Image (cartoon, coloured by chain):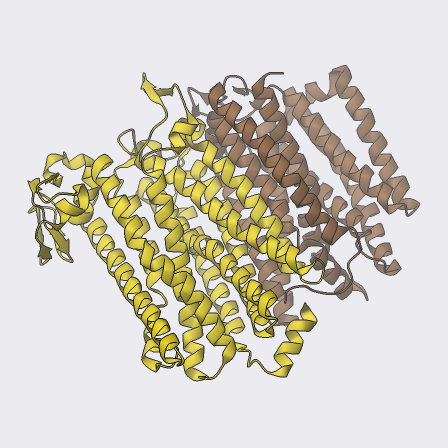
Chain colours: A brown, B yellow
Amino acid sequence: MPLETIIAGVMIASLVLYALLGGADYGGGVWDLFAFGRRAREQRALIAEAISPVWEANHVWLILVVVMLFTAFPPAFAAIATALHIPITLLLIGIVLRGTAFTFRTYDVQRDDVQRRWGLVFSIASIITPVLLGIVLGAIASGTIRVEDGMVTSGFFGSWLAPFPFAVGFFALALFAFLAAVYLTLETHNRELQEDFRLRAILSGVVVGILALTVFVLAEKGAPTVRAGISRTSWALALHFLTAVSATSAFYALWARKYRLARVCAAAQVTLILLGWAFAQYPHLVEPDIRIFSASAPRSTLQLLLGAVIAGAILLFPSYYYLFRIFKTQPQKSTKGAR
Amino acid sequence: MTDLLAARSQMAMSLAFHIIFAAIGIAMPLLMIIAEWKWLRTKDDIYLTLAKRWAKGTAILFAVGAVSGTVLSFELGLLWPTFMGYAGAIIGMPFSLEGFAFFTEAIFLGIYLYGWARVPPRAHLFAGAMVAVSGALSGIFVVIANAWMNAPRGFRIVDGKPVDIDPIAAMMNPAAFSQTLHMTLAAYAATGFVVAGIHAFMLLRDRQNRFHKAALAIALAVGGIASILQPLSGDLIAKRVARTQPVKLAALEGQFETQNRAPLRIGGIPDEEAGVTRYAIEIPYLLSILAHGSPKSFVLGLNEFPPDQRPPVAIVHIAFQIMVACGVAMMLIALWGALRFLWSIARNKAWLGSNWFLRVLVLAAPLGFIAIETGWVVTEVGRQPWIIFGVMRTSEAVTPMPGLIVPFITFTLLYILLAIATVWLLLRQVAASPQGTEADRKEARLAA
């Protein structure tokens, strides 16, 4: 397999992990905003306890994608950062507000009005940020970012200010909320709380389905090449089939209260959606002008980067596993570590 | 404001903001694990309370540092896409390594902050040590990338494009060692002095508080040792700058004429039009000695370089003077503290017995961060008009995006708000001063 493809594969893998783990942390923020009823306070506490120890680490998957992008494919990074300057800037503001408000809430006065104020910033930023992330990815897939001689010629608005990228944005938000709700059913032994999040998972799963269809329909005009990729070839049909199977199984598992199975199916569903997009767009990094083979750094850089990725993986995965084993094998007892 | 100036301002503001949190993120974990290690050894609960209090502060500061660092990694492309398109393949490597180091840091910080009751004490201390080491490595990798901008190596230019790229050679550039050493020591020195200053302030109000005495001792030990070592790394940098960036050295010294037996100027105001630095105290021969090791050696002056290749002299010179003054003051205070400590052992007296010493520590608290900020001005403004020294001008690297004043103002306001919130939360933590009473000990043990 060409080195370029391997590095691009690692980037997609990081993006998938960001969606599965970091995405769910955003989803937690969504359910923080929509916490209601008698158990609203317990719901919020559960979400905070689930996110606190892991969100900083989960967030780093995105940084890895960015640094790998500019190390291995510098012209692609330059073009994306130029054409999508505005949505990326807004995305960054969202990331800053989400992260800081969440931490500030933990360490500020434990008084209801203060907590609610930080909580509001945290949860609204958790909603806006995934939408912007989806807009950025949608614009990259849309084929409207044009590049000539390394210069972006398609302007600063046209490629992302369109129905298709926004549909992808809301789709990403729905997926993250869905993932979070499914995971949260396993974070507690409290039956009522489990039921709360089971209901939220089913509802957001339906929204995911509706938005998936919307994205697919809008792609006909909004991202024709990628849509052609995911509708014709035989592997694409196989991926569609598997995605459909995982989505249906996730619904079944939620219905039957088999939460562990639901978690596996939901994660598989999100993974397959991202893989489908990646395969359909391959070998383009930015449709249609930047291909991974023409935009790549020289072999010397790619080889070193791959070496670093392997060494990093050997170091990171055991540590990451340790982190999750400590905090995620037993549902949270209500003990807050640092406060 | 031109778009170029707005882009430079936004980058400068983002870095000036982030560097504070980055430096604290490097040094605080070391202070925490020293306190925790002392707790494991002495079983004195005061050290456990201390480790936990410091950990709370670190958690707040780390979150701000993590998000402002994320902003910077994107801003490289948002503001300087031409630079990144050109240099990404050459210096992406240290950024990628930084990504992995930061990942390790975030994982083990999660374990450290929330794992008090979930992992055994030694594993907990180990997690803290991992945070300290990976935090220092993160900083080192980022500074290596900056050092490359000062001393670009590891490629050849053919038809205006970099070829024969060797990322290892780029990382091993001549500026890398001295710059990373200087920045890492600066992080420990600045953080140590701020923390020592805060506890000295609390101690002045409550002279017998054992908690603050223990805290002050650890913070001043770390900050003081780094401050005493720092002039050595500064000398390494000066010699390197003299070798590979003589125009920068001339700017930071306000040296317009090329001369041997060049004097070292203390203070002074450079007048770029007249080509002289006025009102400086001049120490004969010393610049020649410091830069090249001999009083007879020549120091190149600014006049050797065309005006369009000189950095703004006054800013660089004055920032440099402030940095050096802060550094010297910290070194002297650290030596004073060391003498007091030795004297107290000999005489069997309390080394924190002097109110004057504590007052000076309070006043010295911000010096390290003033030195860090002015030091970054020296290295960044001193490299102008280049983004890659001698290879690419900053004006060639900027994004074609118009209206850059809008994101500049937006991020400035956002960071001002964050700074206010952070300071407010930290003040709350500091104000809750433990008395080392039975109640405090109970609280610490319960949380453990």
Whether residue A167 appears in this view of the structure is: no
Which residue is painted at 37% across and 68% down in the image?
B365
Q: Is residue A125 left or right of residue A186?
A: left
Which residue is painted at 19% across and 38% down in the image?
B246
Q: Position of residue B121 (x, y in %)?
A: 66, 60
Is A238 above or below relative to B91? above
Q: Position of residue B414 (x, y in %)?
A: 47, 56
Is A203 above or below relative to A5? below
Q: Is residue A193 left or right of residue B207?
A: right
Q: Position of residue B156 (x, y in %)?
A: 33, 21
Residue B369, by quadrant, is: bottom left
Front in this rendered view, residue A323 or B429: A323
Q: Quadrant of the C terminus of chain B?
A: bottom right
Residue positioned most to the right:
A256
Q: Is residue A309 left or right of residue A320?
A: left
Whether residue B22 appears in this view of the structure is: yes
Front in this rendered view, residue B241 or A248: B241
Is B214 above or below relative to A15? below
Number of numbered callouts drawn: 0
Which residue is painted at 52% across and 19% down in the image?
A289
Q: Is residue B355 left or right of residue A125?
A: left
Is A240 above or below relative to B433? above
Front in this rendered view, residue B111 or A93: B111
Q: Position of residue B108 (x, y in %)?
A: 61, 51
Which residue is painted at 74% across and 36% down in the image?
A270
